[in-house]
Image: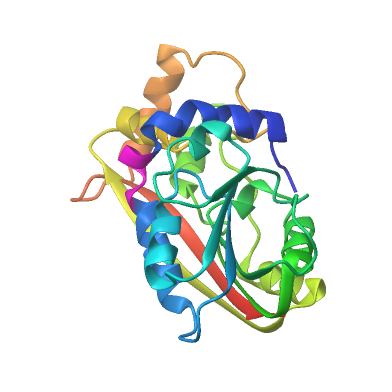
């Protein structure tokens, strides 16, 4: 599928690190939802937050499992510098984890795997998990940011959103990676904005504006912006301009 380069993803999140927490309300909701989906059992000896960002989920996980050793791993060093909870911090790629085989008991990843080649990332997750290890991930589905595609459909031919896997594909990838008791769920979260400019600013503030080849590489002209804005306004609700997150969660064990 169409993915941006790791260099561009890292650069985007390096720039977004100072603004991420202020714009990540939906991301926090998704973390809480994923935490609630974890089975109630003895805490893992060691847990990994893969793509931990500024560490919001690490705080939740450490509150739930206070006796567990926590590892926060992210592609962006700038994101890691914002973590305030005590944990082992590692700069790393989810497709090539710098961790030993079978060294963690819980692999957690919330809204990071959509940037990866998912079969590779899930194979790595399976590799680093020990016997009866648990995986809990949240990613994004094909309906994510469909409002952006609508806004720009008649304006230009550039790519404006990532390519996202369906719930069925994510489940199949997990089975192929060797996971058991795979449970995939799908739900929708919607953020609302007062105007189109603020919607675009919010996407940039969370680092989600990198979509790889096919993206716009020049500044948007005033006329292009106005046409996209007018198309966006056709979707306005009483709550404002919507921006959809098509959320897919997966839990499984080794």
Q: Is residue 60 left or right of residue 163?
A: left
Residue occupying the point 45% across, 57% down:
58
Majority secondary structure of magenta residues: helix
Q: Name the colour scheme.
A: rainbow
The reply to whether the magenta stretch includes residue 228 is no
Q: Position of residue 177 (x, y in %)?
A: 79, 71
Q: Is residue 69 above or below residue 93?
A: below
Q: Position of residue 197 (x, y in %)?
A: 33, 27
The reply to whether the magenta stretch includes residue 22 is yes
Q: Is residue 105 left or right of residue 249?
A: right
Q: Is residue 137 above or below residue 163?
A: below
Residue occupying the point 70% across, 35% down:
6
| Residue 182 picture quarter | bottom right
Is residue 208 something that shows in the picture? no
Q: Nearer the viewer, residue 211 or 252?
A: 252
Q: Is residue 120 above or below residue 167?
A: above
Q: Nearer the viewer, residue 176 or 14?
A: 14
| Residue 227 picture quarter | top left
Q: Which stretch is magenta?
A: 21-25
Q: Position of residue 50 (x, y in %)?
A: 60, 55
Q: Is residue 153 left or right of residue 180?
A: left
| Residue 83 picture quarter | top left
Where is the C terminus found, in terms of image quarters?
A: bottom right
Q: Nearer the viewer, residue 152 or 76?
A: 76
């Amino acid at each position: 599928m169409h993915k941006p380069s790791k260099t561009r993803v890292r650069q985007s999140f390096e720039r977004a690190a100072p603004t991420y927490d202020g714009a990540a309300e939906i991301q926090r909701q998704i973390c809480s939802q994923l935490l609630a989906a974890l089975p109630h059992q003895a805490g893992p000896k060691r847990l990994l937050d893969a793509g931990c960002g500024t560490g919001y989920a690490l705080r939740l996980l450490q509150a739930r499992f206070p006796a567990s050793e926590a590892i926060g791993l992210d592609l962006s060093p700038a994101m890691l510098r914002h973590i305030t909870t005590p944990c082992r911090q590692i700069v790393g790629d989810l497709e090539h984890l710098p961790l030993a085989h079978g060294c963690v008991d819980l692999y957690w990843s919330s809204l990071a795997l959509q940037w990866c080649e998912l079969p590779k990332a899930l194979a790595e997750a399976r590799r680093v998990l020990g016997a009866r290890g648990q995986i809990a991930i949240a990613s994004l589905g094909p309906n994510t940011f469909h409002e952006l595609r609508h806004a720009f459909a008649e304006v230009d031919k550039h790519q404006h959103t990532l390519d996202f896997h369906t719930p069925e594909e994510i489940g199949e990838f997990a089975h192929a990676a060797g996971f058991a008791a795979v449970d995939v769920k799908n739900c929708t979260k919607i953020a609302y904005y007062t105007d189109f400019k603020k919607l675009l600013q919010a996407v940039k503030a969370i680092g989600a504006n990198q979509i790889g080849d096919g993206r716009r590489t020049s500044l948007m002209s005033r006329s292009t912006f106005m046409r996209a804005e007018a198309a966006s306004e056709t979707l306005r609700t009483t709550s404002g301009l919507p921006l959809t997150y098509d959320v897919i969660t997966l839990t499984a064990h080794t």
